[in-house]
């Protein structure tokens, strides 16, 4: 838990520092959208809360641009030699720590290794955390962690107050503060979903435990926002060891 929170705080510290670079040199081949993809108005698949205001439409445009044009979901990376053959896949062979200068500089927490099913060439998939590294053209790929890290950096770069949200049942996403709505708004770049607080518990049927929102100057538990089951017996007996470790972390100097 301590390592995860430190990583989140580190992310925002660097995201604030690289805002101009994000907007200029790193995004020059994929310019940010100038007009919303959709107009303001009711969202028919909204789970909780009301609709977004007109001032918040740009977030939805930015989110769709990010998922459709800028970043790529990657479950198993393609072989660099056989990448043009759609029938070729990769076999996972293990996980290791960062060893190359690029992996260390990119703050890769781990590196997944694969072998090509066609030519047997081994290749590596570093799970980068550094926003600058993730925004480089050759690294714009990953899963929910990379999606959230990169999109949070872009939100900060274009001027939004941003939080990185950590679900201890294995998912991450973002929030931005809407001054029009006067509240934090959920943004999941993997799902291209805005203001869908009930997506995980109601939509996915996920059993949540603890959810924390991390920003540059603090951390808050936001589980009640994403769960409607806090009063149930199951949620009342959330893992006690997790509570003890969390208390020790939050009260440690």
Image (spheres, rainbow, N blue to C red):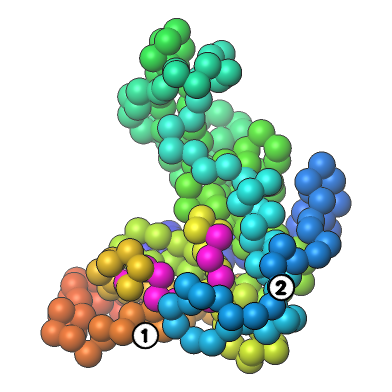
Residue 245 appears in view: no
Q: Residue 34 carries which label?
A: none
The stretch in magenta equals: 192-201
N-terminal-most mark, 1 or 2: 2
Q: Judging from the image, what secondary structure is the residue with disc 1 in?
A: helix
- For the residues labelled 1 and 2, say whether their Cβ atoms are less than 8 Å apart: no
| Residue 209, image x, y percentages | 28, 73
Q: In which quarter of the image is the N terminus?
A: bottom left
| Residue ID at (52%, 43%) | 73
Residue at the limit of the structure toward the top, as seen here: 119
Quarter assignment of residue 61: bottom right
Which residue is found at the position 84% from the left and 46% from the top?
28
Q: In the picture provided, is 91 more to the left or to the right than 127?
A: left
Q: Pointer 1: what residue?
A: 224
Is 215 in the magenta? no
Of residues 136 and 186, the one nearer the viewer is 186
Of the 4 image quadrants, the one containing the C terminus is bottom left
Task: Give the structural element (helix, strand or loop) at label 2.
Answer: loop
- On screen, residue 111 above or below 12: above
Return the residue at label 2.
39
Q: Is residue 166 visible?
A: yes
In the displayed structure image, the side of residue 35 where residue 203 appears, left or right: left
Q: Between residue 44 and residue 74, name the one nearer to us.
A: 44
């Amino acid at each position: 838990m301590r390592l995860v929170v430190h990583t989140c705080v580190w992310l925002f510290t660097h995201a604030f520092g690289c805002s101009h670079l994000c907007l200029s040199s790193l995004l020059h081949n994929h310019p940010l959208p100038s007009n919303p993809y959709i107009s303001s108005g009711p969202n028919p698949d909204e789970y909780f809360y009301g609709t977004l205001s007109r001032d918040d439409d740009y977030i939805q445009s930015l989110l769709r641009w990010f998922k459709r044009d800028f970043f790529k979901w990657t479950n198993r990376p393609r072989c660099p030699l056989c990448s043009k053959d759609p029938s070729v896949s990769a076999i996972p062979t293990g996980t290791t720590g960062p060893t190359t200068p690029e992996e260390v500089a990119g703050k890769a927490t781990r590196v997944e290794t694969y072998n090509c099913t066609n030519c047997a060439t081994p290749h590596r998939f570093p799970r980068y955390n550094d926003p600058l590294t993730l925004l480089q053209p050759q690294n714009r790929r990953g899963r929910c962690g990379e999606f959230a890290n990169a999109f949070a950096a872009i939100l900060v770069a274009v001027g939004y107050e941003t939080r990185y949200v950590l679900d201890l049942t294995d998912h991450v996403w973002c929030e931005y503060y809407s001054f029009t709505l006067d509240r934090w708004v959920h943004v999941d770049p993997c799902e291209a979903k805005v203001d869908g607080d009930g997506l995980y518990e109601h939509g996915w049927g996920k059993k949540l435990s603890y959810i924390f929102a991390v920003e540059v100057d603090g951390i808050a538990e936001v589980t009640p926002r994403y769960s409607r089951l806090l009063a149930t017996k199951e949620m009342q007996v959330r893992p006690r060891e997790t509570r003890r470790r969390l208390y020790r972390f939050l009260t440690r100097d």
